[in-house]
Image: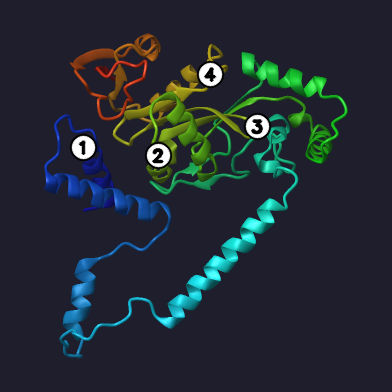
């Protein structure tokens, strides 16, 4: 199977309405492992190639010895001791830290990176791994809309005055340097294609909005069917669609609503699949249903307990779902 065929079958098995058989569940786990290996650039096991090498080998096969051997060799024992020593040294260095690393500090959310203060995206055009399409650093930069959370962060920055923390001082100096450029004297909401730098924040946002364990790393394989909304280095919204025009996830962070962020992200996804019907599943009591209907989605099916395996018992969302379609 091709990589695309594997992904389609995995989606079918992962969203099956009935309980999978043992063989189907095992097959789904194998597909998930292959996808994970691709995301972390690990070599996939090819049994045909392995068996072929053995058959072509001129060395005759030998029976395994029955003599008991130690599972851990001296070299492995030495290696494990080195790992333990390195871990102890790393723990000691962490304890010596007195200040939070700037990239993980609250100041970075206010001022951005010292070298790249306005957004977290590639500086230049880059090629998609899906079809080789050239993707721009920005889909759009919105300088007009000011959501409630954005105004709050700007007020915190104005009230800050004379920061005493070394990180804040460095950040303000970096901000002053950037403000010398005419394009960087305003803050904006940036819409960009999904990149690996966004993965951790995106997974955290979707876990807060839906359920624990959400992982959209497979979308890195076709970034042109995605959009991420950023305020400087903070992910405030995201939307993902498969190459078959099925919307998998769509979310906007609390405090950033009613600023057109969700509408633009959906509009962008629709433009990537002009010749296909767009489909999705949505919880029966999800307010996003109103937005989907504004774009012309029509319900085609009501599915009982569609989210039964995903939503926790304390979730406010209904486990029943509508299947919606936007016909082209």
| Circles 2, 3 touching at the beta carbon (< 8 Å) | no
Which label sits on residue 232?
A: 3
Between 88 and 221, the residue placed more toward the observer is: 88
Q: Quadrant of residue 318?
A: top left
Which residue bears the numbered disc 1?
12
Q: Is disc 4 surrounded by few (<14), some (14 to 19) or many (20+) residues within 10 Å?
A: few
Spatial separation of the CA atoms under disc 3 and disc 1:
36 Å
Q: Residue sitting at 43 percent across and 22 percent down? A: 266
In percent of width and height, residue 54 lies at 20, 80
Among the two numbered marks 4 and 2 on one chain, the one whose residue lies closer to the N terminus: 2
Among the two numbered marks 3 and 1 on one chain, the one whose residue lies closer to the N terminus: 1
Q: Secondary structure at mark 1?
A: helix
In this picture, is 168 found above or below 68?
Answer: above
| 2 or 3: mark nearer the eye | 2
Q: Is residue 145 visible?
A: no
- Count of picture labels: 4
Which residue bears the numbered disc 2?
215
Q: Secondary structure at mark 4?
A: loop
Which quadrant is the C terminus positioned in?
top left
Spatial separation of the CA atoms under disc 4 and disc 2:
20 Å
Q: Residue sitting at 27 percent across and 44 percent down? A: 7
Spatial separation of the CA atoms under disc 1 and disc 4:
31 Å
| Circles 1, 4 touching at the beta carbon (< 8 Å) | no
Between 148 and 68, the residue placed more toward the observer is: 68
Which residue bears the numbered disc 4?
254
Among the two numbered marks 1 and 4 on one chain, the one whose residue lies closer to the N terminus: 1
Spatial separation of the CA atoms under disc 2 and disc 1:
17 Å
Among the two numbered marks 3 and 4 on one chain, the one whose residue lies closer to the N terminus: 3
Spatial separation of the CA atoms under disc 2 and disc 3:
23 Å
| Circles 2, 1 touching at the beta carbon (< 8 Å) | no
């Amino acid at each position: 199977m091709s990589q695309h065929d594997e992904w389609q079958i995995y989606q079918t098995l992962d969203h099956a309405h009935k309980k999978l058989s043992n063989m189907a569940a095992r097959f789904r786990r194998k597909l998930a492992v292959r996808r994970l290996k691709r995301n972390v650039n690990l070599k996939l096991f090819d049994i045909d190639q392995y068996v072929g090498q053995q058959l072509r080998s001129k060395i005759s096969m030998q029976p395994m010895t029955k003599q008991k051997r130690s599972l851990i060799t001296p070299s492995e024992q030495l290696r494990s001791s080195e790992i333990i020593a390195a871990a102890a040294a790393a723990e000691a260095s962490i304890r010596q830290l007195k200040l939070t690393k700037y990239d993980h500090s609250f100041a970075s959310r206010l001022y951005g990176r010292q070298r790249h203060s306005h957004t977290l995206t590639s500086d230049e055009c880059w090629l998609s791994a899906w079809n080789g399409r050239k993707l721009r650093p920005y889909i759009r930069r919105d300088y007009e809309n000011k959501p409630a959370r954005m105004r709050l962060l700007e007020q915190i920055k104005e009230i800050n005055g004379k920061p005493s923390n070394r990180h804040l001082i460095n950040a303000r100096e970096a901000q002053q340097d950037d403000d010398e450029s005419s394009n960087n004297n305003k803050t904006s909401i940036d819409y960009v294609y999904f990149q690996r730098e966004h993965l951790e924040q995106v997974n955290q946002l979707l876990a807060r909005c839906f359920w624990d364990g959400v992982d959209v790393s497979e979308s890195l394989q076709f970034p042109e069917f995605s959009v991420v909304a950023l305020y400087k280095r903070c992910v405030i919204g995201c939307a993902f669609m498969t190459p078959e025009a099925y919307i998998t996830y769509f979310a906007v962070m609390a405090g950033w609503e009613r600023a057109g962020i969700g509408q633009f992200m959906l509009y962008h996804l629709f433009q990537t699949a002009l010749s296909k019907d767009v489909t999705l599943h949505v919880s029966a009591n999800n307010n996003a249903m109103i937005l989907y209907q504004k774009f012309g989605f029509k319900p085609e099916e009501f599915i009982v307990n569609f989210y039964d395996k995903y939503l926790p018992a304390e979730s406010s969302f209904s486990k029943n779902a509508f299947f919606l379609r936007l016909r082209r």
